[in-house]
Image (spheres, rainbow, N blue to C red):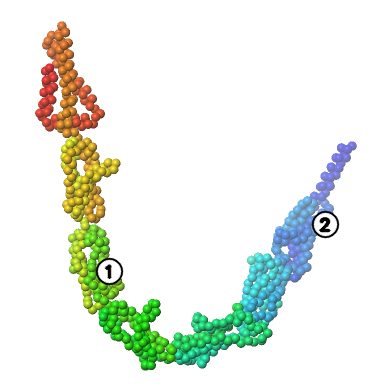
Amino acid sequence: MYLALLVFFLQCSELYTQERVFTFNTVEIKVQPSVKVKNGAPMSIVCRADISKSTNFQLKHNFTIFKDGKLVFMTVSNKGDAQYEIPMARSSDTGEYECTVEAGGKTKSSNSLHVWVTGMTKPILTAEKKEVLEGEVVKLRCELPEEVPPLYFVFRKTKMNSTPKEKFVFEPYKNFSVVEFSVEEGDNILQFDCFGKRNVKLEFESSEYSNKTLVTVREPFIKPTLKAKPSSNITEGDRIQFECSTVVARMHDIEIILQKNRTILNSTVYKYVDEYSVRDEKLLKYSALATLEDSGEYLCKVEQGRTSKTTKLNVVVSELFPKPILAASMSKLDENKELTLSCSISGFRKANFSILRKNSNGDIWLKNSRNLTMRVNVNDTGSYICKAEVKGIVKESRPVRINVYAPVSKPTLSVVSGLPEVVLGKPLRLICRSVMGTPPITFTFYKGNNEVKKVVINDTYATFLDENIRPNDKRGYKCDARNNHSSGMKTSNILNVTVIVPIRNASLGSIPYGEVEDGSETAFLCSVKEGSWPIHFRIFRKTDRDILLFEKSENADRVMWRKEAMNRQDTGTYYCMASNRANVDVKSHPITISVILAAWQKGIIAAFVLIPIAGAATLTLWWFLCKKKKAKGPSMEMSGSALATNLTSEKLTRQHNDGDYYTGSSYIEDSENHMKSTDESNAPEQKGTETVYSEIRKS
């Protein structure tokens, strides 16, 4: 029974499920009246779901509306649509809208829809002060109360009958901005306003202008006045006085400045002005004795904070007398000559004159007179001036240059390096010096009789570089010196320079060459192909450390060294080196010397070898004779024949064995080789050896 009930309920549930089948077709979002809505107008966001159902049954719909990804509206309805009502649309409502519908466990979202609320609210502008002074600032605040940042603010400052000045401010996080405008000289009644801007889809949208705010500007002080007394046209020597004044009202730290060009002549600062006095006059004075240099434009300037006002005045100072003129009897003269200086003023004679000599530490007074005569020396060279004074005005003449010359002394010519010599191929530097004489001095250099260089120099010496040195050059040099003295030119002595030819191609030879007998004399010859004398020769033998065997300096291109007795230790490689004052060592190619046994040494060795051989032969002969006496069968002829045969065979065998014995000793081998060569060239010795062998055979 229970099983039957369970089956019944399952079938009913399946039938009920089949009756409540539905699906979303679309979910749409719309805006009414359009996607562009004016600021302040009503706006509706409508979300509609299109659903298909198997039967007619009721569904609950959960509607959710998002703006720029943020939830702005949510409702539950049995209907297939819902509306999000905005009574007054603002620019902050601009954005991307999207709706989502959830029903029966199923959810579907619409496409996004961009809604643009055009226009912005009118900004509100407020000013911190309605009345300011020149040099102060006006602080303004512009607000867009119903707008959402980021926003741009534009502030405008307008003077009477002038183009507005604007300031742009970007506010990424605030819907208001604050700026300051400085109040400048000449500002009177200022008008300020502002407007806002925002960026919508890469387009700027602007609000209308804010309310206009008026700010009144008052002067802290009036434009200064500048006067010159007795007048702005005066004559040199008169006293001139300047007066710079202004009227201030309730201000602190007023500064008055008088200047000419960029030079400040006088200034003063008033720290405090009685704030209850309506107007207070402030005055700056400056006086001076007028000169021509005082002509020009003067400026009176009054400053307080950021405010400054100026007044200009042009002053002309007439000339009382022209500058004096200094004349010299001569501008270039020899020492001990007489010089006359005269000072005068064109068309003017009543003046106090003085003559001075210019000096870096201060002019040196010479005489209070219009004329000066003196006998000069070299120390009097310099610039001279004269001064004239009339009514306290002092004027100075242009300087006159006077040059006093001492004669040059006879110059000396020398080589800069010291020694009068030069290495072939190297440059030669000469110096010509005149100990006495007033510069500038003209030095002239000669090579042989040819002038090679002329130089004018403000010193007592000059140098000359000869880079073209050849072995057969004329090596006589000289120089002369002259200056502006009337005595004329002086010439040095002739300097002869030795040209040193460097060593070239050193070579080493020996007699005998190659092989030398032990104990014999050997001569070594070191020579060079080219080089100036003296030449320093050195002969070396190469070892782990080269050994110096011989050295000598010779006024020749070769040197010979005799070594009286060579020995076996002298075998080796030899070379020589040559050098001269060119300080370049030239090395020869090496030669090899082998020291071999002398002939008498070979003879002794031969004797020591043959004596044992002869003794052995004698013992063998004796042994055979004894054996012969004991033997009974063989005949004398056969014995003789056998003995001869044995002796011959034994001789050949003994000679071979003797050769094997001396193998391995280079000394013995060299001796044998030398002996062989000696035997070949010495017939009697060879004959004697054959005689010894013949005697052994006979025995």
Mark 1 secondary-structure assignment: strand
Give coordinates of residue 114: x percent, y percent.
70, 63
Give coordinates of residue 37: x percent, y percent.
73, 68
Rounded to the nearest angstrom, the CA distance separating label 2 from label 1 is 119 Å
Q: Residue at x 18, y 28 (%)?
A: 605
Mark 2 secondary-structure assignment: loop
Residue 372, visible in the rendered structure: yes
Give coordinates of residue 192: x percent, y percent.
67, 78
Nearer to us of marks 2 and 1 is: 1
- In the rendered structure, the answer to whether residue 387 lies left or right of residue 245 reads left
Q: Residue at x 43, y 89 (%)?
A: 392
Residue 134, visible in the rendered structure: no
Query: Which amino acid is tagged 1?
Result: Ala
Mark 2 lies on residue = 78
- In the rendered structure, the answer to whether residue 361 lies left or right of residue 618 reads right
Q: Earlier in the sequence, mark 2 or mark 1?
A: 2
Q: Nearer the viewer, residue 689 or 113?
A: 689
User: In the rendered structure, are the residues bearing label 2 and label 1 in contact, judged by CB atoms less than 8 Å apart?
Assistant: no
Mark 1 lies on residue = 462
80, above or below 2, in the image: below
Q: Quadrant of the N terminus?
A: top right
Instruction: Say which quarter of the image contains residue 345.
Output: bottom left
54, above or below 593, in the image: below
Q: Residues within 10 Å of mark 1 (few under 14, many from 20)?
A: many
Q: Nearer the viewer, residue 678 or 109?
A: 678
Query: Which amino acid is tagged 2?
Result: Asn
Residue that protrudes farthest toward the right in the picture: 1
